[in-house]
Image (spheres, rainbow, N blue to C red):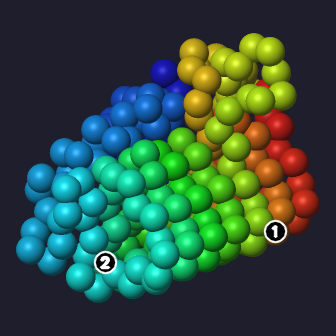
Amino acid sequence: MIDFKEYIPLAWAILPNHTPWEISRKIPEIIEEKIKALNEEYTVNGNVAIHKSAVIEQHVIMKGPMIISANCFVGAHAYLRGGVFLDEHVSVGPGCEIKSSFILSHSAIAHFNFVGDSIIGSHVNMEAGSIIANHHNDRENKVIDVVVDGRKISTGITKFGALVGDYSRIGANAVLSPGTILLPKSIVKRLTLIEQA
């Protein structure tokens, strides 16, 4: 098995010995378990937990399970659904949609972005309008392949966005196709399409 710890070490503290696409499929149940262990610094309403220091602007739609951690910011009209974990100091700008994803500490999803079924490392920045697609609408065969160390691997699933390594930068209006794997400190230029498989 490929060792993905070098991409995002913190993610593998949660489910060691799992691939990113296996983790992405389990995000809702992982979050449900984590909610049970939260302390009194969180306000829990059903299966949505928000740290008392988080700032949530008006007209944000939140469909759990979800954890919004300390010092997070979620801008107006964002749409968070299907299992979302925002680690500490994460910023989600206005009009973003996040679906079934982990976004780790100090990362910023600028505004008008889509992130689906993905694991985003720490200190990642997505500029305005960049997209992480999670489904092959463009192909008859919807099963997602990934490329790791030059090897093409079938995930066996039809919904997986990306694994974005720590300190990566994704430029405005760039698109990461389903199954994108980015090493730490990757730079995706503005208006770029990443299609690895």
The local secondary structure at tag 2 comes to loop
What's the residue type where badge 1 is placed? Ala
Q: Is residue 73 visible?
A: no
Q: Nearer the viewer, residue 186 or 39?
A: 39
In this rendering, position of residue 23 left or right of residue 115: left
The local secondary structure at tag 1 comes to loop
Q: Earlier in the sequence, mark 2 or mark 1?
A: 2
Residue at coordinates 56% horizontally, 72% vertically from top-left?
Answer: 77
Q: Position of residue 116 (x, y in %)?
A: 58, 46
What label sits on residue 172 in the rendered view? Answer: 1
Residue 52 higher or lower than 82, as above or below: below
Residue at coordinates 80% horizontally, 34% vertically from top-left?
Answer: 196
Q: Position of residue 54 (x, y in %)?
A: 34, 81
Q: CA distance from mark 2 to mark 1?
A: 27 Å
Residue at coordinates 34% horizontally, 41% vertically from top-left?
Answer: 28
Q: Crowdedness of circle 2 by 10 Å Cα count: few (<14), some, many (20+)?
A: many
What's the residue type where badge 2 is placed? Ala
What label sits on residue 70 in the rendered view? Answer: 2
Residue at coordinates 37% horizontally, 73% vertically from top-left?
Answer: 88
Q: Crowdedness of circle 1 by 10 Å Cα count: few (<14), some, many (20+)?
A: many
In this rendering, position of residue 162 left or right of residue 5: right
Q: Position of residue 151 (x, y in %)?
A: 72, 22
